Amino acid sequence: MTTTLGRIMLLVAKDLRIEARGRQTIAIVLVLGILIIVVLGIGFGSPGSSGQPVTGFQATAILWVAYFFGGVLCFEKTMDVERRDDALAGLLMTPVDRGAIYVAKLLTNLTLIAGLTIVITPLAVMFFRFDLAGHAGAFVAILALGMVGFAAIGTLFAAAASSTRLQGGLLAMLVFPLCLPVVIVSTQMMRELFLPGGQLSMPGLALLAGFDLMALTVGWLVFEQVLEP
Amino acid sequence: MNRTPTLTGHGPWNARWGTVGMQRLSAHLVRAYWLVTAALFVAVILMLVLYTPVDRGMGPVQKIFYLHLPVAISGFLAAFVVFIASVGYLWSRSMWWDDLAAAAGKVAVLYCAVILLTGMFWGRSAWGVWWTWSPRLTFSLVLFLLYAVYVLIRPTIDSAERRAVICAVYGIIAFLDVPLVYLSVRLIPDIHPSSISLEPAMRLSLLAWFPPVVMLMAGMIGTRYALNRRLRSAEAGRFSEAPSAGAAIRVSAAGGHP
């Protein structure tokens, strides 16, 4: 168990080191996230002009669109790294369980998505003036649980699709419908949070945890089958 | 295991049962199956028009319900077939499982589209709008999207093996998603009635709609599966005739065609 954990951490460190040296994924993902926020900002109009802050409904939509599209780009890029110079073939020849490779890729993706959310969320708060201060902890809990499930599905299909033409929009098309339960639950929970006196929904949290469990279990079990040098 | 389906296209069983006599018998059985299905449809439509009472509140539009519920249950059954075939493919790596999953996926999309459309007609009549984000309509939409993507994504993957693996994984997760979607949409505020009470004549009409709708679903899966087997067999033939041009030929069986 300790050896597996050590190997996972080694693989994550390898991926993050490559990212730190090249900064290719995070730079693209951040710019895409900012562009989405700007486009939606232009579409919704400046809250300052009418003096009205963005509603909870709009805030939730803005954030989730940015997270989802940025996330899909993360999944694609982190698998792209393995395609260069046949790195994946080398990785597959190492005596590491394929499940451990899956978890390592998942952790790398989650780290990058965390970087995306840390930049995008305050930016969206600043642009659209919605109030997160009252429920910061609950917001982070929903986001963390939602993103684990999303990344579990995304990492699996990015690995499966990396040897096919399923790149760009097609990967998003594959991942988004499967992650719709996460979107429905997270957006409903966030809307409730943004309401006056809003509370964190426990059934919602349980559903997100259930989705995470399902996605992680299936991902761990079938990753070996979808990975191809 | 190397399975070589024949051009009559009834899958792995043909290796054992592929005599001319058996093929004729199966053709007669298929014809009889479709005749029975068509006759049952005529009977339940007549029953709906002549026997089933009209709802006092909604009027004749309420009769959509007799189609809606059996189609919904059959749609889940088709989705379950996709799930079983996907697990079967990953377990055995036999391509006929993939052909079955592709066939059931298409039927699941068709049935989900009918669920969605009948739900929308119901909504228009009951609430005056074609669409509202009510839990059940949202659930139908998500279900439709899940299996529409399953069908649409198949032709975009060139390699038959990769297509089968990716679609099998997708088919498993999509089916496991269904209960989660069902539970998650319950967080959305509901305007649907929580329960519907039916008179005995109405209940009988509802039950009568199940056999033809389920038979149509099973028949369509079977027909599509047989066609997928033929296409794969034809593609295998093309490969064996022109091995040098193999790389240039796109394997399009089982969903690889429009």
Image: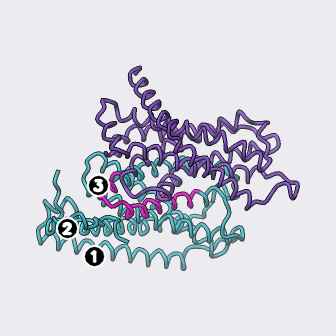
Q: Residue at x 28, y 69 (%)?
A: B227
State the residue lying farthest toward the top: A2
Specify the principal SS of the magenta part: helix
- Residue B159: which numbered mark, if any? none
Residue A39 included in the magenta stretch of the image? no
Q: In front here: B110 or B197?
A: B110
- Tag 3: residue type? Glu
* Residue type at numbered disc 2: Ala
At mark 1, the secondary structure is helix
Q: Amino acid at mark 1?
A: Arg
Check the residue under mark 3 and report the chain it is in: B
Please name the residue that numbered disc 3 is placed on: B161
In primary-sequence order, the first of circles 3 and 1 is 1
Q: CA distance from mark 2 to mark 1?
A: 39 Å
For mark 1, name the chain.
B
Chain B as rendered: colour: cyan
Report whether mark 3 lies on the same chain as mark 2: yes
Mark sitting on residue B31:
1
Q: Which residues are magenta?
A: B139-165
Please state if B56 lies on the left or on the right of B22 as rendered: right
Q: Residues within 10 Å of mark 3 (few under 14, many from 20)?
A: few
Report whether mark 2 lies on the same chain as mark 1.
Answer: yes
Give the mark nearer the N terminus: 2 vs 1.
1
Decide if residue B182 is in sight here. Answer: no
* Residue A165 location, quadrant: bottom left
Q: Dot 2 lies on which element?
A: helix
Residue B129 position within the rendered picture, expressed as x and y whole percent measured from the top left: 70, 70
